Image (cartoon, rainbow, N blue to C red):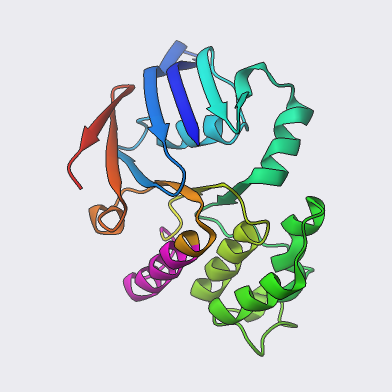
Amino acid sequence: MLALHQVHKTFNTPQGVLPVLSGIDLTLQAGESLALMGESGSGKSTLLHLAAGLDVPDRGQIIFADHDLATLDEAERARLRRQQLGLVFQQFHLVPSLNVIDNLRLQARLANREDAKWSAHLVKRLGLSGRERYFPEQLSGGQQQRLAIGRALAVRPSLLLADEPTGNLDEQSADTVLELLLELVAETRCALLMVTHSARVAKPLNRVARLHRGQLQDAPT
């Protein structure tokens, strides 16, 4: 589903070139879930952005859906992202002027893959029945994150990338959101790569890997 081969990434800073990722090798199978952990500044979000095609590596290959993302131009990466990727972030990134149902359908509409029955099912599974015409500001933080997850899965992606999806929530809301996320991922049979700083959040996933000084290390689940 996703394969990174000898991926290197650096950033230019006022102090000089900063190496962030050094020779990353990672494989994620269809339907598999992987938690990516590591200290602050270890490059977790950078790796996720590369996997999403939001940035390109300095060297190495990122193979997704039989494409090497590093060889695609920005428009080609955006098209692949719309069609086959779901993205969930710590910040909800909902459109304030759109209600629940329109936020939910947004990505699927952009990909021309809207499915009214699937959208209705998602609303029910997200616990937002009766709130379809609510706007984001009328929802709790947990409800907004559930909606963001639903929007990412509305297109039925083959890969879901999640960057600290429970980081802005209290523990109870975080547990509810994580349980729903994993259930919907299993239902859609997509792969999941999730960045988290929490061992408790990482525990239910199939595998855990850690980034340390630009290197990726497998860790016990």
> Among all residues in the image, which is located at the extreme bottom?
130
- Residue interval drawn in magenta: 167-184
Measured as percent of width and height from the top left, residue 102 is found at: 77, 70
The answer to whether one can see residue 14 in this image is: yes
**From what the image shows, is residue 89 above or below residue 19?**
below
User: What residue lies at 71% left-to-right and 82% top-to-bottom?
Assistant: 132
Q: Is residue 170 magenta?
A: yes
Please state which of residues 207 and 87 is positioned toward the viewer in this rendering.
207
**From what the image shows, is residue 41 above or below residue 200?**
above
Please state which of residues 197 and 109 is positioned toward the viewer in this rendering.
109
Q: Main secondary structure of the magenta part?
A: helix
**From what the image shows, is residue 161 above or below residue 200?**
above
Left or right: 55 in relation to 134: left
User: What residue lies at 63% left-to-right and 56% top-to-bottom?
Assistant: 156
Left or right: 79 in relation to 125: right
Measured as percent of width and height from the top left, residue 42 is found at: 35, 30
Q: Quadrant of residue 81?
A: top right
The answer to whether one can see residue 96 in this image is: no
Measured as percent of width and height from the top left, residue 122 is found at: 61, 73
Task: Give the total of numbered labels.
Answer: 0
User: What residue lies at 60% left-to-right and 59% top-to-bottom?
Assistant: 153
